[in-house]
Image (spheres, grey):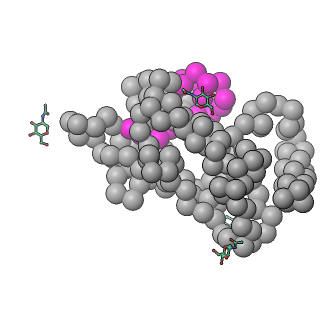
């Protein structure tokens, strides 16, 4: 564990300095978990990218603490797929959606003005909406329904920063 941790730390520091970002920036210390919960999610380096259902058996709904979920389920890796599952709109369920915020400020404020919808209200049905973590960047996810109400009050938001897998 100590060695793996060191590897990952070195890798992250190298990648971060390549991109000219500082690890001291608080944005980057968030949502990674640093293998703290590695008993739940052992790092199996022979495995390829994983498919992870957002919220686990809770799926994507109002009132579940997704930032806590992301923290508990970190780390996530490049090419992992996040699966958002939610019921299509009906007169008994609230519609949901998936948006990506461009920056931490919009995320913190649940301000959707510059956010991009990546899945509409119907796309979470069936096997769910799949999103591949393809880039080295923080991903700020949220539900965009009710002009930020689901994001802010319903806790339907979380951050993910994918890590490099050391090797397959
Ligand atoms: C890692 O994953 C591979 C492929 O899924 C599996 O065969 C292997 O047993 C796993 N190793 C550990 C230590 O879990
Ligand atoms: C979600 O859980 C975290 C602890 O992991 C806590 O700090 C935060 O206040 C919770 N958010 C809500 C909206 O309950
Ligand atoms: C992610 O997947 C793409 C396309 O499948 C592949 O070219 C790339 O090497 C993968 N990246 C990593 C870090 O696994
Ligand atoms: C709710 O849905 C049912 C069946 O889908 C329909 O019969 C009913 O009229 C709907 N009610 C409202 C208020 O839209
Ligand atoms: C949601 O997106 C799907 C796939 O792009 C599209 O077929 C569907 O019409 C859209 N639904 C709404 C309500 O916009
Ligand atoms: Cu929602």
Classify 162 as above or below 155: below
Horizontal placement of 122 versus 81: left or right? left
Q: Which of 45 and 148 lies nearest the eye of the viewer?
A: 45
Residue that protrudes farthest toward the front in the picture: 39
The residue positioned 67% from the left and 70% from the top of the image is 47
The residue positioned 71% from the left and 67% from the top of the image is 44
Q: Is residue 110 magenta?
A: yes
Residue 82 place in picture, x, y as percent: 54, 53
The residue positioned 30% from the left and 45% from the top of the image is 88
Quadrant of the frame with the C terminus: bottom right
Q: Which residues are magenta?
A: 96-113
Does residue 56 appear anywhere in the picture?
Answer: yes
Quadrant of the frame with the N terminus: bottom right
Horizontal placement of 39 versus 92: left or right? right
The residue positioned 62% from the left and 53% from the top of the image is 133
Q: Name which quarter of the figure residue 115 lies in.
A: top right
Residue 135 place in picture, x, y as percent: 69, 52
Residue 92 place in picture, x, y as percent: 23, 37
């Amino acid at each position: 564990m100590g060695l793996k941790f060191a590897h990952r730390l070195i890798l992250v520091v190298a990648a971060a300095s390549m991109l000219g970002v500082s690890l001291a920036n608080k944005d980057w210390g968030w949502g990674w978990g640093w293998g703290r919960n590695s008993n739940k999610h052992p790092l199996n380096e022979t495995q390829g990218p994983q498919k992870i259902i957002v919220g686990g058996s809770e799926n994507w709904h109002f009132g579940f603490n997704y930032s806590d979920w992301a923290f508990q389920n970190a780390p996530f890796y490049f090419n992992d797929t996040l699966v958002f599952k939610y019921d299509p709109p009906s007169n008994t369920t609230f519609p949901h959606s998936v948006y990506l915020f461009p920056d931490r400020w919009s995320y913190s404020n649940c301000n959707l003005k510059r956010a991009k919808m990546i899945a509409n209200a119907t796309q979470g049905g069936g096997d769910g909406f799949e999103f591949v973590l393809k880039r080295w960047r923080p991903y700020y996810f949220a539900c965009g329904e009710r002009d930020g109400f689901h994001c802010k009050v319903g806790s339907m938001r979380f951050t993910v920063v994918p890590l490099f897998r050391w090797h397959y």
